[in-house]
Structures are given as C-alpha cells and as structure tokens.
Amino acid sequence: MSSPPLSSAIKGILFLSGLFFLNFISRVIFSPLLPVIEQEMGLDHTRSGSLFLFLSLGYFLSVLSSGFISSKINHKRSIVLSCLLLGCVLLVLGQSSTLLGLQLCLFGIGISAGIYFPSALATISFLVPSAFLARGIAIHELAPNAAFVSAPLLSDFFLRYLSWRAGFAFLGVLLIVGALLYGIFSKGCPEKGRAPDLKALLSFFRMPAFWGMMLLFSLAIGATHGIYSMAALFLINDHGMDQEGANRLLAFSRLSSIVMPIAGGWFADKFGQQRTMGLVLLLTGLCTVMMGVVESGPWLIYFVVAQPLFAVCFFSAGFAVLSRLGAHEFGNLAITLCLPFAFLLGAGLVPALIGWIGDRASIGSGFVAMGGVMVIAGTVSYMVTRKQG
C-alpha cells in the first residue's frame, strides 16, 4: 500500500515549526541584546557570559527529565506546557532588574524550552508518513536556522521601537497565544513518552567512544551557539561597531546555516563521516582564532562570515556517527543523552569562559583560546580516523 502524501501532515509540521521558531529565538535573541543589557545593568563580561551557563543548565536538566514529564502527560500536552511556561518566564524576564533575577529567568527559559524538543520529534514521527519522515524533520529544522538569522534583526527592531524588556514580553505573549492555539486546534500526538532507562544510561557512560563524541559535539556546539552568544559583544566592545551594524553582520553571517548542512552531509557521505567531523572542527577552529586575531576591516568580516559556514557542517556527519553508537541495543539514546551534556558545555560553559577571559584580556582572546582547542581536537580526530581508514 502506498503511504499518504506529505501534504497530509504539512499543516501540523508548519504549526510545530512556528512554535519551535519562537522557542529557539527566545533562547538566542539574548545574544544580540546582551551589549545593551550589560551596559544598562552594569555587568562585566564574566557575569554576562555566565548567563548562558544558567540557560544551558536549565536546558540540560529539562531535556534529561522530559521523558518523565511526557510519560505522565502526553506529547501534545508537553508541548503546550513548554510554550506556556516559556511565555510566562519571558514576561517575568522583561521585569527583571537584578543579576539574580536575570540568572533565574535564564535558568527558567532553559527549563521551559527543553521540554519541547523530544515531544516535537515524537509528534513529527506520529504525524508524518514514514516514507517522508526525514523531510518532515528537515522542515522542522528550518526553524532554528531561521531564528539565528532573525534574532539580530528582531533585536534591532525591539531596540528601535520598543525596548529589550518589551521585546521579551512580546515574545512571551506570542508563545502563550501559540500554546493555547496548539492545545485547542492542533491534532498533536496523544501518545505518552517513555521515561529514561537508567541501566541504559550507565551503559553509555562506560563507552569511551561516547565520551569522545560528547567532547566533539561540545566543541561543535561551542563553535555555533557559544561563539554566537558572545559575537555581538565582541564586535561592539573589541571592534567599536555600533549595535545595528553588529547585529546586521551577525544576521548575515548565519544565512549560510540554512543551506550548508546539506553540503556538509554530501561531503560526509563522499569522504567519510568521522574524517569530516575532524576536518570541519579544524577549519572552524582556524576561523575562530582568526576572528580574535585580525584587526577591524574586511578580514574581520570575512572570518565572522566564514566561521559559522564551516561550523554547521559538523552536525550532519556527527549525528550520523552518534546515531550508530549503541543503536542495535539502545536505538537513538546516544543522541538523547549526548546532546544535553554537549549543550551544557558548548552553549553554557564556553560563553562563560570567553566572558571570563574577556575581563582579563579581551573577548577576542577568548575566541583565540576556544579556537585553539577546536584546532587541536579537530587535528587529533582527523589523524585518528585517517590511521583507522
């Protein structure tokens, strides 16, 4: 029997993609707004960078516990709960006037946002015919790439016509309205999730390959999320750009993230997935180092644009390798377990360390240090896979 067409599920996928866009932009828009928030609240770079550690810690705990939540309520209600909580936290964030308030709100954003993703993937699998599942996921994955491009432009709009506080409140209202509409009108997935198997988790902790992949994913997420988090602050403080110019450059630099993962997947299939991961990290590290070294001018713009162009190519190969790790016995548990840890380190610890280095030298020096680690890890990974091949 022929499977139903993809068009039968397209409305549900687009609805989810809209919610995912709001979910993701609520996490990344803090980056282009950070220079204004830092100046208004009198924060140093260390405290500013630590805010992303609180967000990542919340996201880490939420993704790991999402299975317990969806096993008690179904996946549709988990998505509604995530959007409602995230919307409420954003409304509170707009009223925060202390560092502690910002830290708690960023932690709350991470907690709220992390509930969404596992249930969204389960919902796509429920709605989309199996013959079109990869395409359904690909449509959904356009949302974070679009959010990376849109966040700097939207932050400029908020700063010009509203304020950063009103901007967060606006996003909060959109999420609450979206949650209510999804709960009332969407078909969703009525199935319940499955709580994590603790014995299976311990089995992965005994695998050296799992720890190696977690390190590589941490660096790759650090190269995308971590560098992005501090990029606007870097361009304004280290290179004297104005807010609008920095955000436009940041948005332009992320346009490649929409199409480059496809090129990365083709390259990985042709030249080897593990070899591609090492080469991509090496090239990304070199671009990151050069971002911190070059003076203002055309070369700075070139490396700001080139850095994410290489960085996003890691994940097509990385997910393919990670999905095979223990797949026969544990399915895709390696991805479910690896990503929260990698996100905590790459999107949380990396910005915090760059901010700490920025207070003692410059944010550019933090980029050089982070890029150097990528170069070393990428070189070692490439050489190991080359010897094995």
Image: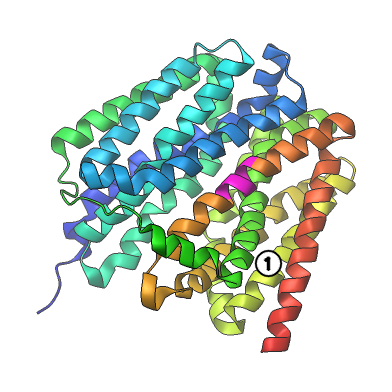
Q: How packed is label 1: few (under 14 Cα within 10 Å), some, or many (20 or more)? A: many
Is residue 347 found left or right of 291 in the rendered image? left
Is residue 242 found left or right of 317 in the rendered image? right
In what quadrant of the picture does the N terminus appear?
A: bottom left
Residue 364 on image: x %, y %: 83, 41
Most extreme residue toward the bottom is 389
> Of residues 97 and 235, which is closer to you in this image?
97
Identified by mark 1, the residue type is Val
User: Could you tell me which secondary element the residue under label 1 belongs to?
Assistant: helix
Is residue 133 found left or right of 65 in the rendered image? left
Residue 303 on image: x %, y %: 77, 52
> Of residues 53 and 206, which is closer to you in this image?
206
Is residue 165 found left or right of 68 in the rendered image? right
Q: Which quadrant of the figure has residue 7?
A: bottom left
Q: Which quadrant of the figure has residue 77?
A: top left
Residue visible at 27% across and 40% down in the picture: 78
Q: Is residue 360 above or below residue 75?
A: above
Determine if residue 15 is in view: no
Q: Is residue 161 above or below residue 356?
A: above
Q: What is the magenta segment's predominant secondary structure?
A: helix
Determine if residue 29 is in view: yes
What is the basis of the colouring in this image?
rainbow
| Residue 357 inside the magenta-drawn segment | no
User: What number of labels is visible?
Assistant: 1
Residue visible at 15% across and 46% down in the picture: 187
In what quadrant of the picture does the C terminus appear?
A: bottom right
Residue 52 on image: x %, y %: 61, 34
Check disc 1 and report the residue beneath it.
Answer: 280
> Of residues 61 and 229, which is closer to you in this image?
61
Residue 22 on image: x %, y %: 40, 35
Residue visible at 48% across and 40% down in the picture: 59
Instruction: Magenta stretch: give its range.
Output: 343-348
